[in-house]
Image: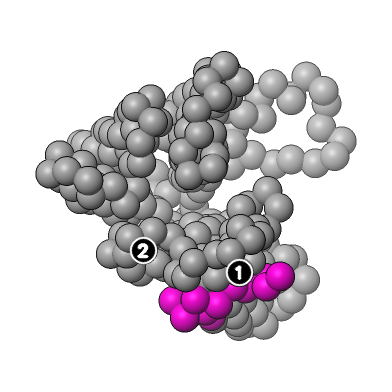
Amino acid sequence: MTDATFSPSMPARSTGRMIPALFGADPRFAMLGALMLFSMLPTGLAMQVDPRLFQGENIWLKPLKFEFALAVYLLSLAFFARFLPAGLLDRRGFRIFSVVVILCVLGEMAWIGGAAMFGTASHFNLSNPVMQGLYGLMGLFAVTLTSASLIYGIAIWRNPAGLPDAALRLSVGLGLGLTFVLTVVVAGYMSSQTGHLVGVPVSDARVPIMGWSREVGDLRLPHFLATHAMHVIPLGGLVASRMLPAGAALRAVWAVSTVFVLVTGASFAMAIMGLPVFPV
């Protein structure tokens, strides 16, 4: 795999090469991520023409959110794939794993979109044996697709040739690995509950755009933080590797990772106790 060097003075004609350079290392996840982005268009159209509501929100809002979230996740993996060991993605076992992850993503979206189409819940829906079985199966799908971040993180961390900067390589490995660990912990607890809220809101006050409750505990906030360890920690590693000596940069990466875990854990604990992180 080859790395690409970018600078503000790059000629305009090279702009068209940026996307292949950034995401061409893993075309399978890159294409699926692009598909998730494009699928937001018909879902957004459905929101405009279908006025049905479920629990106070348009029934198509949830599929739209998941399409965007999965697009970000898949395209991020495709970006980080450029630092994987050469030839890893072409190995038979890894190709099979990639196909399994792709099928899990498509299965999740079929489940969420199908529930929206019928005007019912996908998550926490235990109304009948079929929905109970699907909920459990989709939990397995979610763990499987998230495990890709752990596998990528370990492989990149063990491959100095792909990313020679030790601090940056550590930050990518920790970020991807913690995305899996933290998400499984938070999402696993969430799936054992009857909903993402801990408590009964009165005024339904929410954080703008994100929709997190400002009255009671909301498990969606720690879940959101967990899934973005793969972005926050590598960004901290990038800054540290550019501004600090090698040894200090490594210590900074461990510090950023520790703080991130503590913040995510604190928001998780507050949600479990029924306390909003952003009170009214």
Location of the C terminus (image quadrant)? bottom right
Which residue does the image show at 45% across and 69% down from the upper left? 198
Which residue does the image show at 55% across and 24% down from the upper left? 51
User: Is label 2 in a helix, a strand or a loop?
Assistant: helix
Viewer-nearest residue: 185 or 15: 185
User: Is label 1 in a helix, a strand or a loop?
Assistant: loop
Q: Position of residue 109 (x, y in %)?
A: 37, 33
Q: Position of residue 47 (x, y in %)?
A: 56, 25
Q: Relative to 131, does residue 146 appear above or below in the rendering?
A: below
Residue 269 within the magenta-colored segment of the rendering: yes
Viewer-nearest residue: 6 or 138: 138
Please identify the quarter of the rendering in which residue 133 is found.
Answer: top left
Residue with the mark numbered 1:
215
Badge 1 density bin: few <14, some 14–19, many ≥20, Cα 10 Å = many
Residue with the mark numbered 2:
190
Q: Magenta span covers which residues?
A: 264-280
The amino acid pointed to by label 1 is Glu
Viewer-nearest residue: 100 or 161: 100
For marks 2 and 1, give the CA distance: 18 Å
